[in-house]
Image: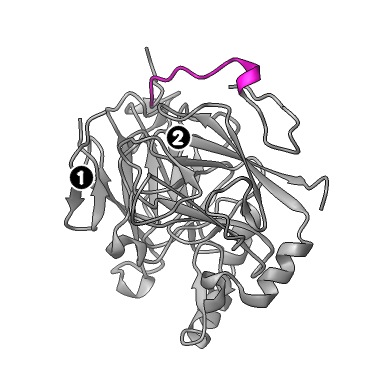
């Protein structure tokens, strides 16, 4: 496979690779369907499973505000906006605030957690299993077992509670190696066991070419979050009320930073457009589409954004949010630690992982 030169988006610092029926899948893949090849690495017992984009933030984007966990349980914390903001200001010097879910994190959380984290590693009784659901280059059905100490069978063998994912490199030693492909970097992302603010496994993008999480229920949008569908990537900015000319209006702006519509901007206010629909056609089942894309991997009704007057928050749901899903999903960038839940889908390049949390048999 040839090596492609990367492209740097000067406005955002994002590292891109080369750009080159009704709704088309994002990739043309041939999954491995032989159940014997889909072996789950749990106590040596086999279990069977049924069966991108070159994008990510550089320093400029990863430091921006935004990016929320798509689990509604965490979004509830965000809805108490005043309390979260007050807490952030009071702890600005001594701690970091996870803007994905409004939960504080102390500096030691980013360093492995210290003695408390070691104690939690020995007491936590759930293992994380990551199954490759789809991929162009990696074995579909392969499953990774991750314990509070790290990846089972890793040659890095550090027992530090961190699993690094990336390409083979002399600069970094990763626990899991991707086959060489566009959109994956030397040390791409990590999964880390953390005991605070809540015990569990957390995923975070590292080296700038993106790790995305699928929106299953809804996502509260914050200034600086990046959403993705097909090969389109939109940077969202939300202006505070004090900056607006119209009373009680919230302004939301979408800027296409990658994909066929790159450079285009779309701006709406909550007074005139409390509901915004993105899709591939101008209308869908007699419903008006506010922003239409031409890419065939975008569904006719891709996602819906609405403004809630009570919480003063913009929320996004996949498709119409009423049961019907878009073909390829709507995703957001994990530019800060996001707690992994069972059923969560995590996408890197052409590879999608499905997460499962299960109680350890021999703890």
Circles 1 and 2, Cβ within 8 Å, touching? The answer is no
Q: Does the stretch in magenta take in 135?
A: no
Q: Is residue 91 above or below residue 194?
A: below
| Secondary structure beneath label 2 | strand
Q: CA distance from mark 1 to mark 2?
A: 19 Å
What secondary structure prevails in the magenta region? loop
**Looking at the rendering, which quadrant does residue 44 occupy?**
top right
- Percent x, y of residue 18: 20, 37
Q: Is residue 313 above or below residue 306?
A: below
Residue at position x 46%, y 30% in the image: 138
> Is residue 70 left or right of 265 when viewed as pictured?
right
Residue at position x 47%, y 49% in the image: 306
Residue at position x 51%, y 70% in the image: 110
- Percent x, y of residue 352: 49, 35
Residue at position x 65%, y 25% in the image: 49
Q: Is residue 231 above or below residue 202?
A: above
Q: Earlier in the sequence, mark 1 or mark 2?
A: 1
The residue pinned by badge 2 equals 351
**154 or 285: which is nearer to us?**
154
Whether residue 349 is visible to the viewer of this picture, yes or no, is yes
Q: Which residues are magenta?
A: 27-37
Check the image and name the residue furthest to the top: 21
Q: How is the image coloured?
A: one colour
Q: Is residue 31 above or below residue 321?
A: above
- Percent x, y of residue 248: 41, 67
**161 or 103: which is nearer to us?**
161
The residue pinned by badge 1 equals 6
**108 or 331: which is nearer to us?**
108
């Amino acid at each position: 496979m040839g090596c492609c030169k990367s492209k740097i988006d000067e406005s955002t610092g994002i590292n891109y690779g080369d750009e080159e029926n009704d709704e088309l899948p994002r990739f043309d893949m041939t999954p491995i369907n032989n159940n014997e090849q889909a072996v789950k690495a749990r106590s040596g017992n086999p279990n069977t499973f049924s069966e991108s984009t070159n994008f990510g933030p550089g320093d400029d984007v990863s430091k921006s505000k935004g990016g929320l966990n798509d689990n509604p349980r965490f979004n509830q914390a965000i809805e108490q906006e005043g309390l979260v903001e007050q807490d952030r200001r009071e702890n600005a010097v001594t701690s970091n605030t996870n803007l994905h879910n409004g939960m504080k994190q102390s500096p030691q959380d980013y360093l492995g957690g210290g003695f408390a984290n070691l104690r939690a590693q020995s007491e936590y009784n759930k293992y994380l299993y990551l199954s490759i659901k789809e991929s162009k280059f990696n074995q579909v059905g392969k499953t990774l077992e991750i314990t509070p100490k790290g990846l089972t069978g890793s040659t890095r063998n550090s027992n530090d509670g961190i699993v690094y994912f990336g390409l083979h490199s002399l600069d970094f030693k990763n626990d899991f190696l991707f086959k060489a492909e566009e959109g994956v970097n030397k040390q791409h992302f990590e999964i880390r066991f953390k005991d605070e603010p809540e015990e569990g496994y957390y995923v975070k993008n590292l080296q700038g070419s993106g790790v995305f999480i699928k929106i299953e229920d809804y996502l509260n949008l914050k200034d600086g979050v990046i959403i993705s569908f097909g090969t389109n990537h939109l940077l969202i900015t939300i202006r505070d009320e004090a900056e607006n000319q119209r009373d009680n209006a919230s302004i939301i702006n979408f800027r296409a930073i990658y994909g066929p519509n790159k450079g285009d901007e779309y701006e709406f206010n909550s007074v005139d457009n409390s509901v915004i629909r993105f899709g591939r056609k101008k209308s869908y089942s007699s419903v008006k589409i506010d922003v239409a894309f031409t890419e065939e991997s975008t569904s006719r009704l891709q996602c819906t954004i609405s403004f809630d007057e009570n919480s003063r928050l913009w929320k996004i749901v996949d498709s119409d949010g009423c049961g019907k899903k878009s073909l390829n999903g709507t995703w957001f960038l994990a530019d800060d630690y996001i707690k992994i839940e069972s059923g969560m889908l995590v996408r890197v390049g052409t590879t999608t992982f499905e997460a499962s949390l299960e109680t350890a048999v021999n703890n």
